[in-house]
Amino acid sequence: MHSLSRRLLLSLFVPLVVFFGVTMVVLDASFRDVAQRSLRDSLDAQIVALIAAAEQQPDGSFEPAAVSPGLETRLSTPGSGLYAQIQSTEPGDVPWRSNSAAGTFIDFGPPIAAGERRYFPARAQDGSELEIASRGISFEDEKHVRRNLTFSVASTLARYNEQLWRFRRELFGGFFVLTLVLLATLGFVVRWVLSPVRRLEKEINAVEEGTRESLGGGYPRELSGVATNLNTLLIGERNRLERYRDSLGNLAHGLKTPLAVMRSTIEGLASEKARVIAGEVDRMNAIVEHQLKRAASGGALLGQAPLEIEPLLVDLRAAMMQVYMRKDLSITVSVQPSAQFVGDRGDITELLGNLMDNACKWCKERVKVDVTLDPVAEPKQRLRIDIEDDGPGISEGDRARVLERGVRADEKVPGHGLGLAMVRETVDLYGGRLAIEKSTLGGARISLSLPGR
């Protein structure tokens, strides 16, 4: 079944992950932009220092002075990761290249016009990534001759990429921990907020199982109306059932007197019609007696206390052994310990009495009663009762028919055909299930599923 807690946590988790994902992408892009601008600022600073240190040589070329305070010492170390060169506008004319660029074969790109700037990525011969910055400068010598030179500085991106990945790892780890903390906090909050709903669910289950008669109080405003209305419904159900019982009892009680008068009137008559009428009056009187008993005790009711099954079956077994003492009868009763029926004592007694009486009537010599509990079944069908015999059984074609009122599998056997119909009505009243099958003993097996715990 769907859970409100799971649904709420999932509905919060998905937007949270999307929000954190978008935030990480934005932060990563911002960090890359800042790091790239910082790298280019560093390259620009080296270009400015290189321009400031550049001196004209006797042959007319320009080279930086041997000692220049603004230049990085890494430019003098081969393979240091920072490289520079000065080239003129003439193709292949490179007046100066830093010692660090020896053997690297770095392509600093073509010369550019004075006043221009250029940034572009490149790759060294060893495969390392580089970022190159170039600036075009126009120099005028002592003879007032202008020369356009391109000053270029290249830096490896190894440190840049290392910083970027370290930032990403820390960013992802931080957001992952933050997500877990937020989800744990949300789980606690959801559990606390929905605790009244879980309490309501437990109390409703307790009412269904008969361990309590009504719901408690102290619910939040959003649930107090539900709890109050359910309690009102429970009280109304009890009152309705009581009125039903009273009306049925009054009706049956009112019919007893006319039936008694009819019986006393025809007792002195000896005709065949009188005997037929007397038989029908007896039948009506039996129905009235049954309905009086049913009105006095029967009916499924929420909040009823559970009762033990085993003592009832022990008493019924003793009664059946007494009634059918002329038969060589064996009645075996097996009850799962502490199995309980949630409902009215009169109903379960009448139900078991009818079924055991039928089994004893039709059996050859063996009747078996098994009572078990199915913990995974719904509360209204948790108690399983199987009553079997070794009689002729009930054919598949008759199994549905014998549950109707006034229908008997064998019309030659005395009876009114009401027993199984009453059993079916009682089972339906409790929301249970009834099935007629073939018994392993050879006869019929009546299986009932009723409210239990």
Image (cartoon, grey):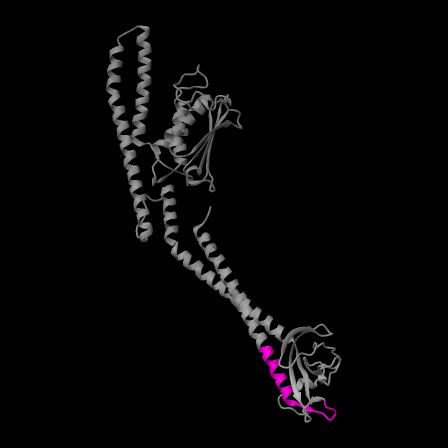
Observer-nearest residue: 176 or 133? Answer: 133
Residue at image location 33% in from the left, 10% down from the top: 276
Q: Is residue 90 above or below residue 427?
A: below
Q: Is residue 220 above or below residue 433?
A: below
- Residue 86, given in percent of the width and then of the height, sits at 69, 84
Residue at image location 43% in from the left, 16% down from the top: 413
- Residue 295, given in percent of the width and then of the height, sits at 30, 29
Residue 229 visible in the current orientation: yes
Q: Is residue 45 left or right of residue 349?
A: right
- Residue 188, given in percent of the width and then of the height, sits at 43, 59
Span colored in magenta = 38-60
Magenta span has 43? yes
- Residue 323, given in percent of the width and then of the height, sits at 40, 23
Q: How many marks?
A: 0
Observer-nearest residue: 305 or 366? Answer: 305
Which quadrant is home to the C terminus? top left
Q: Is residue 233 left or right of residue 405?
A: left
Q: Is residue 445 left or right of residue 239?
A: right
Observer-nearest residue: 58 or 419? Answer: 58
Residue 318 visible in the current orientation: no
For residue 384, what is the image quadrant?
A: top left
